[in-house]
Image (tube, rainbow, N blue to C red):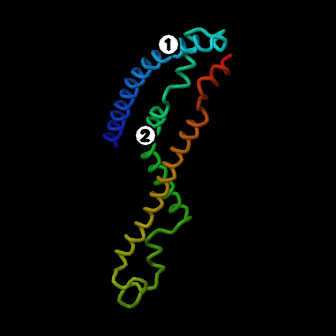
């Protein structure tokens, strides 16, 4: 587990470093684009930018034009890497608690409740001895882990994509009007 945590920290740290490098590059391009767009709008529609300085326009331009998806995908991947082992631990604890408090039967109880013939074989599946059937019934609990982890991942993507769309800025003209 310790090696997995180190792996996650290295991967998330590396991805975050790449994201910061990319953000610095994009900020330079956005500053250049903001200056060009401010000059263009100042000459084409001077009354539209009456009370707006070049620095304020650059902030609005950056807010409206900055790509936001890479930051959200970094958050999704980081949450997957860090949250999946925690979710597996919670699922294992839930499985233990359900067996402990008798909410679901133990695999040995399920196998014992099946009809056995005189030779000790099940009538449902004739070729499987009871010990192997107990392993099979125990492995059916893997669906619990599979769907639990799947629901966790869907929930993470839903949460971050909902935030992505709720915090979406408007078009440049809308943001300039909103800033007044």
Label 1, residues with CA under 10 Å away: few <14, some 14-19, many ≥20: some
Label 2, residues with CA under 10 Å away: few <14, some 14-19, many ≥20: some
Q: Position of residue 21 (x, y in %)?
A: 37, 23
- The residue indicated by pointer 2 is 77
Q: Could you tell me which quadrant the C terminus lies in?
A: top right
Q: Position of residue 113 (x, y in %)?
A: 48, 79
Q: Residue at x 54, y 13 (%)?
A: 38
Q: Residue at x 65, y 15 (%)?
A: 48
Q: Residue at x 45, y 49 (%)?
A: 89
Along the line of sight, the residue nearer the viewer: 174 or 151: 174
SS for dot 1: helix
> Residue pushed farthest left?
3
Q: Position of residue 127 (x, y in %)?
A: 33, 83
Q: Between marks 1 and 2, how big is the CA–CA gap? A: 34 Å
Q: Could you tell me which quadrant the N terminus lies in?
A: top left
Picture quarter containing residue 116? Answer: bottom left
Q: Which mark is residue 89?
A: none
SS for dot 2: helix
> Residue pushed farthest front?
44
Along the line of sight, the residue nearer the viewer: 161 or 27: 27
- The residue indicated by pointer 1 is 35
Picture quarter containing residue 137? Answer: bottom left
Along the line of sight, the residue nearer the viewer: 62 or 38: 38
> Residue pushed farthest bottom?
118
Along the line of sight, the residue nearer the viewer: 95 or 67: 67
């Amino acid at each position: 587990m310790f090696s997995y945590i180190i792996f996650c920290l290295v991967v998330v740290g590396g991805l975050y470093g790449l994201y910061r490098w990319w953000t610095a590059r994009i900020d330079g391009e956005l500053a250049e684009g903001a200056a060009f767009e401010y000059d263009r709008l100042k000459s084409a529609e001077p009354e539209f930018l009456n009370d707006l300085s070049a620095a304020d326009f650059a902030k609005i331009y950056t807010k409206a034009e900055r790509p936001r998806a890479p930051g959200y995908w970094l958050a999704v991947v980081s949450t997957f890497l860090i949250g999946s082992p925690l979710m597996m631990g919670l699922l294992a604890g839930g499985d233990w608690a359900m067996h402990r408090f008798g909410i679901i039967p133990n695999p040995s109880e399920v196998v014992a409740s099946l009809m056995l013939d005189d030779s000790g074989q099940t009538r449902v599946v004739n070729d499987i001895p009871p010990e192997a059937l107990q392993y099979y019934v125990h492995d059916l609990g893997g669906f619990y882990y599979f769907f639990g982890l799947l629901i966790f991942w869907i929930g993470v993507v839903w949460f971050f994509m909902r935030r992505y769309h709720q915090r979406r800025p408007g078009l440049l003209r809308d943001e300039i009007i909103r800033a007044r």
